[in-house]
Amino acid sequence: MTAKSSPVFVRLAAVSKRFINNGATTTALNAVSITVRPGIVTGLVGPDGAGKTTLLRLIAGLLRPDSGDVAVLGWDMAANPVPAQADLGYMPQRFGLYEDLTVLENMNLYARLHGIPDTEKQDIFDRLLRFTDLERFQKRMAGNLSGGMKQKLGLACTLLRKPRILLLDEPGVGVDPVSRRELWRMVNELVNEHTAVIWSTAYLDEAERCDEVFLLNSGALLFTGKPADLSRRMRGRTFLLKGVPGDRRTVLSEALKQPAILDATMQGSAIRLVLRANETMPLFLQTGQLADCPDAAQMQAPKQAIRGTPDAGIGTDHAENLTHAALSSLPDAAAHASCAEKVRLVSVAPRFEDAFLDILGGAPHGESSLSRFFAPVAGGEHAYSVEARQLSKKYGSFYAAKDITFSVRRGEVFGLLGPNGAGKTTTFKMLCGLSKPSRGQARVSGLDLAAASSKARGRIGYMAQKFSLYGGISVLRNLHFFAQAYGLYGKKREEAVAHMLELFELAPFAAQAAETLPLGYRQRLSLACALMHSPDVLFLDEPTSGVDPVARREFWMHINALVQKGVTVLVTTHFMDEAEFCDRIAFIFHGQVAALGTPDELKNTVAGPDLPEPTMEDAFVALIKNADMQEETRHCAQTR
Amino acid sequence: MARSSAFIVSLRRIQALLIKEIAVLWNDRKTRILITVPPMIQLVIFAFTATMDIRNVHLAVYNKDHGNHGQELAQRLDGAPIFTRLIFTRNEANLRETMDSGKALCAVVIPQDFSRALHAGTTARVQIILDGRRSNTAQIVSGYLSEIIQTYYSNLSIAKHTSHAAVLKTAVPLVRHWYNVNLIYLWFTLPCLVGIITTMITMVVTALSVAREKEMGTFEQLLVSPLTPAEILTAKALPAFIIGMFEGSVLLAAAVFLFGAPMAGSLALLYASMFVFILSITGVGLFISSLSRTQQQAILGTFIFLAPAILLSGFATPVDNMPDWLQTATLANPIRHFLTIIRGVMLKDIGIADISANLAAMLLISVCTLTIGVWLFKRGLK
């Protein structure tokens, strides 16, 4: 639906907003002009700290702009926000649900707050409960709902008054893919010619679902328009290198050293490559062979080079043909059959994120400084770095985790995936010693976490999702503390700290309080603190949620370097990107390992004629449905 | 050898956490202000408000006597500095109304035969009526009144004795307040305040230390490190302990040098007692800290402990006035013991022998609270 003809509901003209905190001024929004129309879902896209929440709060009349005008439904929000607010529904990131009240009590409370007459209340409740599929949970305490259900309830409470403008601040955060899809379905149903929806998100894949997006980065508006329009710029520049022989992590880090490459990411066993505009695909990435392959040096550039040209009518199919043509035109392609047999460079559809990254200047280049400094982890006699043996956690009569068993090899990236409340976090916590298993054993580097806890924990590096260092004290003090807490003392400590300051370019900030660091640097500091003692195993809890794509690439580049040094990585995540980076994934559902395998294996289990190339998210959704179905059949069998 | 090196490693970890704790407390401007400014303000304000010196009392006088003695006694009462106003009443109803409305705290009824009885040398009874709704103040005022009346009698007797050579039948007690010769109430309050304000600060700092980390999410980061629960607790308790000692010293100095409170006894003994006392308070703080998940809960827990502990400390009301079972209960209250010691040492140079029981009790309490604190902390780590 084209919305150009419909009336403008929200208009921001050259709006700027600055915040002063501890004497430091941060520009949250810099001369941003946007218009929002009804009938479409408008996406407000950008990493944390981009200014999304500030923008939403300006529209809601909760903040005044420093300069510029905010007009909502024709009302000047700076002068008089009250009339427009009657037609606004604002769902903040953490909607104010009362955890100790039931679903219905929460709705009743908000109905009363909004002055909804009792006569109409029942009809509205019935409609919204059906709409959000919360009918069955009316009597449940809001505190006991899953992340997805809480968001649905928040949405229901926001919708009580039938707002004409719906402002949703990151409704997808902390929500598993299944619930996320449901939320999208609901919001799409809501949109009509009388309703405008603004959905803010840090997930760039969510941007693709919006009809129009505003891409924000550090307070600046980078793009306005249809997401496909932005992605289209990248056509002909995105490829998938399949069947990579040998160690794909080495290929990945080599690829990132190439100036022609804008971005390279792991996607299961394949590597996704994005070319810079008007650059030629490096040869070794066409063959998947590194210099150690015989004759690689003698290879000549193909006559028909693969260039990242902005397409002029060349579709993706064409591009793929071009690739094959290029490959077959190699002088002695057949001679390299042994090496290049299965290697295929396939053109794929560009993503919104590719374009964002293009605007930001691409993934960080070169190699992780860690690969030079970090000493390889000694082999040791233990084949497995992390072992879960019948790990179980029981709360009362309820098993949060039951008989979880798997082993992670040294130098493997192992992912724990699953919806909220299904046992993923419980398992993770037992494995890093934060929670004692009711039964079973968690072992790290051959040490039992229950028996030799302090010693075993000394072999672990841990990085939480939330920034969990000491914000009030300086970067240097944080590093000193963690170094010494992990047994580094005196000269060793000074060395390790100096190392980290250099590696992560933190030296200029050494004396600064950690909380004043920019987001990306905070993450570097977290990683530095987790690495100083050269751990065998690194535990990462949703490490890059909300981080901008460049910082995220940088983070995974470091992780990649560590893995090549033999560090084992255990990661829990909601991010499908992060899942793709894993060597193997355990899918945890209903407190049990519902599936275990490589990302490709998991994806293949759901592949079918109607879904030839399933994404990780498709796999995730299908796995949950399967597990639920099995549960139901078992339940039916039991009741019979 | 391995054992001792493990011990050193453990000490280094504690040292690391300790330095971090102090840096966190010191770098936070709010904490810095919290532990310096309010205690001084509290000391000043409490010192003047929590006084039990009685001033500004209104006294009703119902003088039925028409003789000179009744008149004279009334004048004596008027001359006493604590009675700022004398209300003369004409009849019973008038008197009742004055007391009912609270215009006067107490009343003196001089009987009709007062002068006659005094002249005759027989007993003359003066009735004192006190407002029971304000029993504490009234009780003190009654003391003053009796004293004034007694003095009047005895002056009279002495006068008689010289003229009539009559023998004084009863010895008039000459009251002298030891230890606080001029009965300056401030001297009583100041040592108590030093103890109580120190308690408050120490408890808040301890209770917040773990709760703050839980709230900020840094606690898990600590738990996955090689630091053991015992090491974490030690490093958490120490800064609070140091701050407590510091706070106690500053307040003590202020009490002595600023307010002129006496320091009669041994400073060393006082510090030894303070050491044990703050140890026990730190234990209680850790106890609360282990139980609370947020800073809000920690503060709430602190006040749930503090309110009854202060009431049962003998600061506001003497422990001796409490029922027996409650007196026994106060033995478990470290504040009570410390107040006894600090008052004793500051005002009357009490010796170690006199406070050994209190000291031993505090030591026992410290051991108990610290043990329970550690136990709860470990239990909470599941």
Image: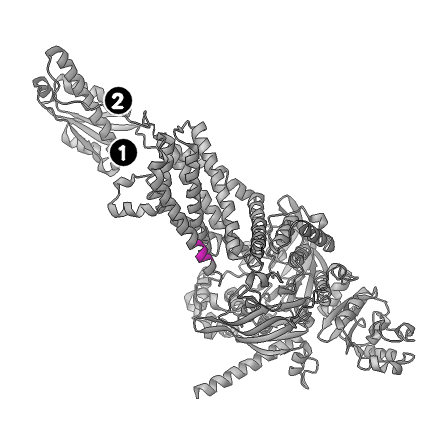
Q: Position of residue A171 (x, y in %)?
A: 58, 65
Q: Position of residue A209 (x, y in %)?
A: 66, 71
Give the Cα separation between the discs numbered 2 and 1: 16 Å
Q: Label the magenta part by its dominant secondary structure.
A: helix
Residue to which mark 2 is pinned: B80
Residue B120, visible in the rendered structure: yes
Q: Which residue is more in the foreground, A317 or B49?
A: B49
Q: Chain of mark 2?
A: B
Q: Which residue is more in the foreground, B283 or A4?
A: B283
Residue B376 in the magenta stretch? The answer is yes
Numbered disc 1: secondary structure: helix
Magenta region: B373-377
Mark closer to the chain start, 2 or 1 = 2
| Crowdedness near tag 2: few (<14), some (14–19) or many (≥20) residues, C-alpha within 10 Å | few
Q: Quadrant of the C terminus of chain A?
A: bottom left
Residue to which mark 1 is pinned: B137
The count of marks equals 2
Residue A223 in the magenta stretch? The answer is no
Is B246 located above or below residue A485 in the figure? above
Numbered disc 2: secondary structure: loop
- What amino acid is labelled 1 in the image? Thr
Name, please, the residue furthest toward the bottom: A640
Residue B45, by quadrant, is top left
Q: Quadrant of the N terminus of chain A?
A: bottom right
Q: Position of residue B25 (x, y in %)?
A: 55, 45
Q: Which residue is more in the foreground, B313 or A179?
A: B313
Left or right of A601 in this view: A235: right
Residue A210, visible in the rendered structure: no
Callout 2–callout 1 Cβ contact below 8 Å: no
